[in-house]
Image (spheres, rainbow, N blue to C red):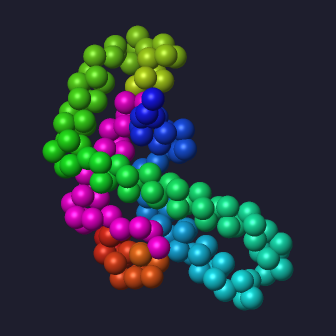
Amino acid sequence: MSIDINVLMRLLDPNIHLVDFEKIMMDYAALKEKLDHTEAQSFYFKLAIDGKKEELAQLKKRFNIYRHLFKKYSAYKLRKKIQRQEERKLRINTPSDLNLMAYMQLDSINHQIAVYKNLLELKGRTADLKPIDFYTQHPDQMLKLLNY
């Protein structure tokens, strides 16, 4: 039995957006730099080094989820997915008639639309999303990807 990547992504981070994608990259680069130069860090940072390494691993995992989705879907498929989710959204009752379950379904649909739109925007910026360590070693490429 395979796990749907949308479910996995939602479980790992229900609020992932492109802004979060950018934050993941920036936080990863900053934390990796600190871990590479621990001698320059505070005493308290050194006490929490194991937790910082785990945080770095989690950031890398979140980035890899984005990378997997980026490679899995073409721009055409992403546009079709957005269109299908928009159609699903229209079938839900008007806001005055929504109950808790309908609100949850609407939130899920809006989340999926945001993720697909963000992936589509990334596809417009680059043809290939490389591993996150590549971007930490080549800051110019990170800035280009983040559109700075």
Name the residue at 83% across, 80% down: 43
Residue located 50% across and 70% down the image: 26
Residue 91, percent from left and from top: 28, 16
Reply above or below: 89 against 79: above
Q: Is residue 24 visible?
A: yes
* Vertical comparison of 119 with 33: above or below: above
Q: Does the magenta stretch include residue 71?
A: no
Report the predominant secondary structure element of the magenta stretch: helix
For this view, does 20 lie left or right of residue 78? right
Which quadrant is the C terminus positioned in?
A: bottom left
Q: Point out residue 88 in the picture as x, y percentages from the top left corner.
A: 28, 22
Instruction: Tell me which residue sits at (42%, 40%) in the image.
Output: 5
Highlighted magenta segment, given as a residue range: 108-133
In percent of the image, x 25 and y 37: which residue is there? 82
Front one among 97 and 64: 64
Question: Please, which residue is most extreme toward the top here?
Answer: 97
Residue furthest front as drawn: 1
Question: Which residue occupies the extreme bottom position in the image?
Answer: 40
**Which percent across, then down, holds residue 30?**
57, 75
Q: In this rendering, is residue 67 above or below 145?
A: above
Query: Residue 53 in the image: x percent, y percent?
Result: 68, 67
- Name the image quarter holding the N terminus: top left
User: Is residue 118 magenta-colored?
Assistant: yes
